[in-house]
Image (tube, helix red, strand yellow):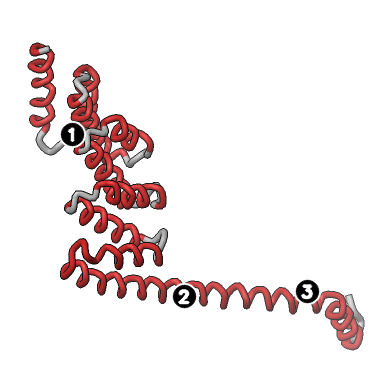
Amino acid sequence: MYDTEEQQVEAIKRWWQENGNFVIVGIIVGLAVVFGWRFYQDNELSNKEAASSSYQALQTSIDAKGYGAAAELQAYIDSNKGSNYSFMAALQLAKLAVDGDKFAEAEAQLSYVISAAAANNPLLPVAVLRLARLQVTQAKYDEALATLTATTLDVAFTATVEELKGDIYVAQNVTEKARIAYQAAIDNGGLENNAVLQTKINQLSVIEAAQ
């Protein structure tokens, strides 16, 4: 395109004058993205390590104080909202609260995990099932059923959920729904020993005959 080297140089100068600023800005932005991402990753790693370290230290306090470490647990949960460490701490605090017959506090901790954990978080079904069972022990049957149906769990938990529903229906003396739930538990894998579920189904006939 160009007859002489001077023409090539001039063309390059013109191109640079027209596009140089865009090139420089692009380089700056690219470097900012790269170094910003590295900083973010390093910061995230640092935060996770700090959370892990403080969580391990918290275990020592829990072992020594039991529910007496509740304030420390809550402070840790508040400082690490949304992290798996905060969910594990909340599950621990819920257990300590149940052991101390502080059911309302236990429900609050389990509800936090349910509301904050992602749908694929392995701690979510733990919290859902524990909350439902806690509600059952308090004869809050409708609330327990609502807990089990409000959150969609992985199909691996279907059998457990259906069996618990069946137990709730038995407690409510709604045997037909209990039978359907127990059968659904069997159809979805049930327990390692399906005989347990089959026994529960057979007992429904005894309950119905006694009514």
Between 112 and 48, the residue placed more toward the observer is 112
* Badge 3 or badge 2: first in the primary sequence: 3
For label 1, the crowd category at 10 Å Cα-Cα, with few meaning under 14, some 14 to 19 and many 20 or more, is many
Q: Amino acid at mark 2?
A: Asn
Q: Residue at x 32, y 52 (%)?
A: 109
Query: On the rendered structure, is 14 left or right of 119?
Result: right
Pointer 1: what residue?
190
Element type where label 3 sits in the image: helix
Q: Which image quadrant for residue 81? A: bottom left
The CA span between labels 3 and 2 is: 31 Å
Q: Nearer the viewer, mark 1 or mark 2?
A: 2
8 relative to 156, above or below: below
Closer to the camera in the image, 129 or 188: 129
Residue under the image location 37 percent in, 39 percent down: 151
> Is residue 122 visible to us here?
no
Q: Amino acid at mark 3?
A: Phe
Q: Amino acid at mark 1?
A: Gly
Q: Residue at x 80, y 79 (%)?
A: 20
Marks 3 and 2 close (CB-CB < 8 Å): no
* Image label count: 3
Residue behind mark 2: 43
Q: To which residue does mark 3 refer?
A: 22
In the rendered structure, the answer to whether residue 134 lies left or right of residue 52 reads left
Tell me the distance, in whole angstroms, between the alpha carbons under discs 1 and 2. 44 Å
Helix, strand or loop for disc 2 = helix
Question: Circles 1 and 2: CB distance less than 8 Å?
Answer: no
- Determine whether label 3 and label 1 are within 8 Å by CB: no
Gap between marks 3 and 1 measured at Cα: 64 Å
**Circle 1: element type:** loop
Q: Position of residue 131 (x, y in %)?
A: 27, 43
Q: Is residue 168 visible?
A: yes
